[in-house]
Image (cartoon, helix red, strand yellow):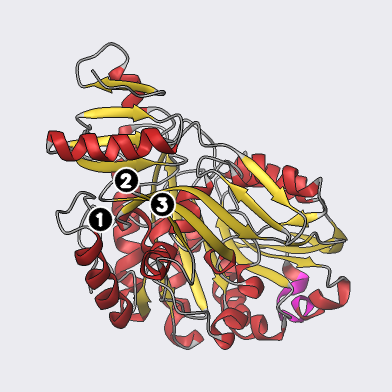
Amino acid sequence: MNAFTGAFWRSGDPGFADAATARVFNRRLPSRRPAAVLRAADVTDVAEGVRLAAAEGWRVAVRSGGHSWAAWSLREDTLLIDLALFTGMSYDPTDATVTVGPAVRGGLDLDPYLAGHGRFFPVGHSPSVGMGGFLLQGGIGWNCRGWGWAAESLVSMEVVTAAGEVVRCSETENADLFWAARGSGPGFFGVVTAFRLRTRPRFRELTRSAYVFPSELAGEVLSWYHVARHDLPASVELAAVGSTPPGSDAPVLTVDAVSFDGGPASLAALDSSPVVARASARTVAEPVDFAELQAEQLRGNPENHRYAADNAFLSGSASELVPALVPAFTELPTPRTFTVLGDFTPLVARRPPDMAVSLQTDLYFAAYAIGTTPADDVLSRAWLDRTMSRLAPHSAGCYLGDSDLAVRADRIMSDAAWSAFRRIRAARDPEGRFPGYLGDPAQ
């Protein structure tokens, strides 16, 4: 009998099936299932769970928010430690840090909590994403272009190691674990039960410009975007988005920019497009609420749908990239599918600190194929394969948060970081208690 404060199920127990897939956002569920599920109530439960897994000969899988497209938490022959109850938040005004549990949802929970203190943290764009997976994968949050990876603002973590010990990790304590956690995502060989984060003053105003272009202008718009992005200050989040408006069957390309405290002047460069007069809709330097931006993200990432996603960090001239990109913005497989081309120029220019997340170029492409039926899965997968094949010659690797390495292997770290990660993993988890990645990173 296991003396857990939380709930525990073995395969075959009543409630096991629901517990195994609880909170998995992507309804395109794999067939993989764990041997047992522990919905831990506290860090003691987590440590006892890791030790039980060792005694039973199981590996350990972890679920924070359940938002991963590949359903990383569903692994065979594992104890799935579900951290759903780890939703605590505590703000410390003495150093403007906030401590959060891994199941805290960035946009729905943490942002309104910090707003009450006049503070902000660049959470994930989809408001329901859990902080655990988001931070461990590096975290492409709001204005990553200017503020950097969310993991850069990690001060310390509480971690249950592969040996079942509870340790604190920071740049000065268990620094090897701290380095590895910031970017290794589901390959991390420990269970993070709390994150302490450095916050920033909350923005005073948000200003938005958006230009919607018909798909036949995609080549011209993307060529212009490739150059114009360099004229925007680091206070501006910028993206080109391919999507199909509700009630339409014709994709559009939207150049969307949000300025954090930069005001209208920070967005002026977006009026320079040679085809700006042919935009079908324009929003020029208008105030916008963060709640409105988050509501848009919720509509664009609906629950109870079937997702397939892929991405690439890109480099190259407009003449090289644009022909490969245009079909990804104009030939979408389902009505809800969308694609994004983001700019990271200021981030790359300042060189982020040394941590496991170590791949970035000045352009980031991500594709999210969204369907409702298994037939949509087939269309989505074929479309993603074609899309990523066209972009492969220009890719430096991928971001774990939008990847499924079991379908398409790709680089997730620099060569030096991958070597360091493997050395730390071998020392910290010599028995392979944590199963690592679904599919092999192509290093």
Which mark is first along the chain, 1 or 2?
2
Determine the secondary structure under disc 3.
Answer: strand
Task: Work out whether residue 173 or residue 274 is closer to the camera in this orientation and state it.
Answer: 173
Which mark is first along the chain, 3 or 2?
2
Q: Main secondary structure of the magenta part?
A: helix
Q: Quadrant of residue 256?
A: bottom right
- Report how far apart the C-alphas of labels 2 and 1 lie in the structure: 8 Å
Q: In this view, does 432 lie to the left or right of 363?
A: left
Q: Are marks 2 and 1 in contact (CB under 8 Å)?
A: no
Q: In this view, does 251 lie to the left or right of 230?
A: left
Q: In which quarter of the image is residue 59?
A: top left
**Residue 366 percent across, percent down from the top left:** 46, 62
**Residue 131 percent across, percent down from the top left:** 53, 49
- Name the amino acid, label 1: Tyr
Residue 378 seen from this side: yes
Q: In this view, does 68 lie to the left or right of 411?
A: right
Q: Residue 203 carries which label?
A: none
Q: Which residue is drawn at 24% across and 39% down?
A: 51
- Name the amino acid, label 3: Val
**Which label sits in the foreground, 3 or 1?**
3
Q: Residue beneath label 1, please?
A: 437
Q: Give the range drawn in magenta.
A: 270-277
Q: Answer above or below: position of 313 versus 88.
A: below
- Name the amino acid, label 2: Trp
Determine the secondary structure under disc 2.
Answer: loop
Q: Does the magenta stretch include residue 15?
A: no
Work out which quarter of the rendered image holds the C terminus and state it: bottom left
Q: Which mark is residue 72?
A: 2
Which mark is first along the chain, 1 or 3?
3
Q: Which residue is drawn at 50% across and 31% down?
A: 85
Q: Residue beneath label 3, please?
A: 159
